[in-house]
Image (cartoon, coloured by chain):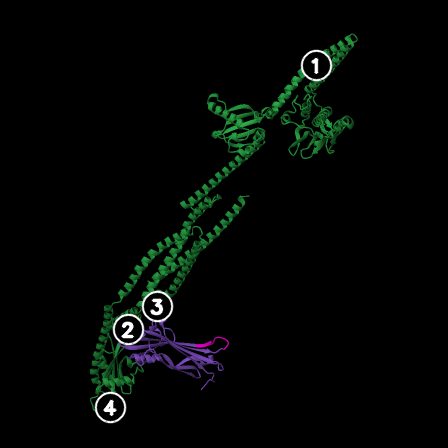
Amino acid sequence: MAAGPAGASEVSELRLEREDDGLYLSTTLQIALPELAEDALYKGIPMFFVAEAQVTRDRWYWYDRQVAETTRYLRLSYQPLTRRWRLNMSPVPFTNSGLGVVLGQTFDDYADAMSAVQRFSRWKIADNDVIEPDAAHTVHFRFRLDMSQLPRPFQIGAVGRSGWNLLVSRSQRLGAEPAGK
Amino acid sequence: MSTDPRASVSASAHAAARQSRAVRWAVGVGAAIMSAIGLVLLFLLTLATNNRALYERNYAWLFGVNVLVALLLLAVLAWVAVRLGLRLRRGRFGSRLLVKLAAIFALVGLLPGLLIYVVSYQFVTRSIESWFDVKVEGALSAGVNLARVSLDSLAGDMAAKTRNASGQVAQVSDAAAGLVLERIRDQLGATDVVLWNAAGQAVASAGQSRFTLNPERPAAALLRTVREQRAITQIEGLDDISDLAGVQAAQTARVKVLALVSNPSVGLLVEPRYLQATLPLPTALVANAIAVQEANREYQERALARGGLRRMYVGTLTLSLFLAVFGAVLLAVLLGNQLARPLLVLAEGVREVAAGNLSPKAALQGKDELGGLTRSFALMTQQLADARQAVEKSMGEVDAARANLQTILDNLTAGVIVLDAQGLIRSSNPGATRILRAPMAAYEGRPLSEVPGLAEFAAAVQGHFDAFLGDSERHGLDHWQQPFELHAASAGGVGQQHATSLVARGAELPGLARLLVFDDISEIVSAQRAQAWGEVARRLAHEIKNPLTPIQLSAERLEMKLEGKLPGPEQAVLAKSVKTIVEQVDAMKRLVNEFRDYARLPAAELHALDLNALVADVLHLYGEENATVRVEAELDPRCPPIAGDAQQLRQVVHNLLQNAQDSTEQARAGSPEPLPPVRISTRWSQSSRRVRLTVADSGGGFPAHILQRAFEPYVTTKPRGTGLGLAVVKKIADEHGARIDLSNRTEDGVVRGAQVSLSFAPEPAVAL
């Protein structure tokens, strides 16, 4: 409920920090989960999210070269038995058999869980050595609902249905500033 | 010649047929392969439906490939349809039949497919809807609620127990708490009991956590909540459950109760302490609860995905319908082609035969009846062609025979006329025209009696035919024959001389036609007459010559005996009479000799002879001094020698010149003008290879009736001629094999004189 009214999904601000060991991204998304997805969550069906961060080096003569890519997978589920929310995070995609080694958090209500989903703090998206000091770079950030992890009939049913679409993205230029702080 | 283009045409047609067959084969094979792939994919699709995971994983690309195959089939179908349409529009032969067959087969393929599709569609949608039920949903959520309530009540129960137990710790100091905790653990049946102080540090513990160095510490917010609510419960171990870990989770599920330890002493600064007990949940309950929750989740999942599921099934169904129908229609078109081909070949052949083209027809090697039909048709056409060829050949032979016959008829000297039953002229030959001296060809289709001058002849012929046909059974003859004198009565006495002698012969032709054949026998009659005259002359000469000598001798003796014995006047009478007798006897002797000469003309002895020299020799006798009529010669120096008897030819020239002079003299007697000369000429005709000797005069010419019979003895125009001159000429000419022509020279239709010409063959040695 704290996520605000539906329909106002955006990446309000994107903070990029260059530190000694790499590039860190911090942001808080303003997203409203589509209604159908929220319903499905309440019915005990887990939802998957994917956050992608791409660092590209600008090239005037060719398409930009991708120098780093980091992906974070999130899985949000509701336990009707305990009435609690569970959020799992993993750098690798979730598979059907078990969740593997993942970071799990438990929340008592939906708003807490969603705010945890929307919050990215100090997410390391690139090593320092891939970022060339004199070149201009752009960071592309995308956050979306991952339908491919859902059961297949869902996908077929969901194709082209706005009730399942969630995608926010933002690109920000990373100035050619000297490293270190 | 005529087989050549036909062969090339059939060869090109053959090549075209082969090419189109190749195209058809390519299409057929391609379609078969594609439909096979489609069917295999369909099979995989249905097989995959048994295994949900495999199905879901492969559904998308299977669907895509199937769609692709369906599109390919559709494209092929469209191509075939367009081709068919083009053929139809171009009005190509047989396309209508093909379209019809294709339509029938397509209908046969489409209708059952549609029926099955509709039924299956209904079935699928209904059955999918029937899976989802409000009652089932309600039961499932009730089950989940039940499980939750059970767990909650269990937890509440445990919380109450823990709170009660916490009273035992209240009076115990931190140091002594261990024992009490152990007792509490036993009482509660907990796996683990920990006593926390307000700072969140473990004061004492019992159970498993005693062995952990740093047990999980409750959050400060949690402790605050406990202070307010005195006790809270937390069910743990139910997170992160999946299908596989369900049983394990049931064993690890536990309730963690955190209760505030009530402090009875009223000390303000006494810190609150918290008792935490971890109690295992009953495995069966947890397992059931998890099962219910999972079932509910799956149910909800499917309920939400039901649209997609339905779409999936319907899509599969539709796709299989498309595949089946496209395959069926394509096969139908190809099979229809196969079926229609013999019919097309046959129909094409029939059309060609109807147009008169009997060239060899294509025959299919198929074993079925249609192939047999095409073979029979080809055989029939061949036979027809053979028959026609035979007919044409025989027609050609008949034509040739007819042309042959016509040539024979045209060159026949005899006249031939074909009359029909009514006596109308059906056809005639040039001989008839010549003999009858009437343009018979102009009178075709008209009765013979209408021809001028032939009315009598026609009547006589008709009479003979009537009699012949009427009596044919009786006398059994197949023809009649009768001599006729033509033009006999047309002009009285003079006409007698025009008369033509005919022998006519009539016979019946098939189809009631009548054949009239007649011959001009005038010349034969003339020849017979000449022969008869020869005989008469010989006999007369013999009979007359014998008494002539005694008569002459007697007369001379009489004169000798009586000379001087008679008086003067009588003496003169006697002398005159004797002279007359002797002269007349001499004349008679000459006459008889001429007759004898004519009759006993010696056979000509033929030698190479220069006609010009002969003529020149003879002309010496006809010099200016001893001739009343001049003779002009015009000799062709190119004349080759001819085969001739010089003696006889000399006589011929004499006779002819004499006749000419006599004729000229006779015609111009009493005319003051000088007499025109007689012309004698020789001419070599290269084209006919004959030497022609012509004598022409300016006399009165031949009267028409003489012209025909001039060569007969005793036919003459001279008042005192024996009529043997030309007869002798004719005889000598015959001996020499020369042709003799007799004609009148006419100028502007007026007779100016007569002309006799003989044409001799050159001497063989020279001619060759």
Q: Secondary structure at mark 4?
A: loop
- Residue A96 place in picture, x, y as percent: 34, 70
Q: Are marks 1 and 2 on the same chain?
A: no
Three-letter residue code for mark 2: Lys
State the hue of chain B.
Answer: green
Which disc is residue B545 wearing? 1
Count neighbours of disc 2 (C-alpha within 10 A) and say few if under 14, some if 14 to 19, many if 20 or more: many
Residue B310 position, x and y percent, is 31, 65
Q: Given the image, on which type of amino acid does mark 4 rest? A: Val
Residue in front for this viewpoint, B549 or B627: B627
Chain under callout 3: A
**Residue that label 3 marks:** A156
> Do marks 1 and 4 both belong to one polypeptide chain?
yes
**Residue B47 locus on image (x, y percent):** 35, 61
**Horizontal and vertical percent for residue B500?**
59, 26
**Which dot, 2 or 4, sits closer to the camera?**
2
**Badge 1: few (under 14), some or many (20 or more) residues near its Cα, within 10 Å?**
some
Mark 3 vs mark 4: in front: 3
| SS label for mark 3 | helix
- Rounded to the nearest whole Å, what is the CA distance between mark 3 and mark 4? 63 Å
The residue identified by callout 2 is A43
What crowding class fits label 3: few (fewer than 14 Cα within 10 Å), some (14-19), or many (20 or more)? many
- Specify the segment rendered in magenta: A60-68
Specify whether disc 3 shares its chain with disc 2: yes
Q: Which mark is residue B270?
A: 4
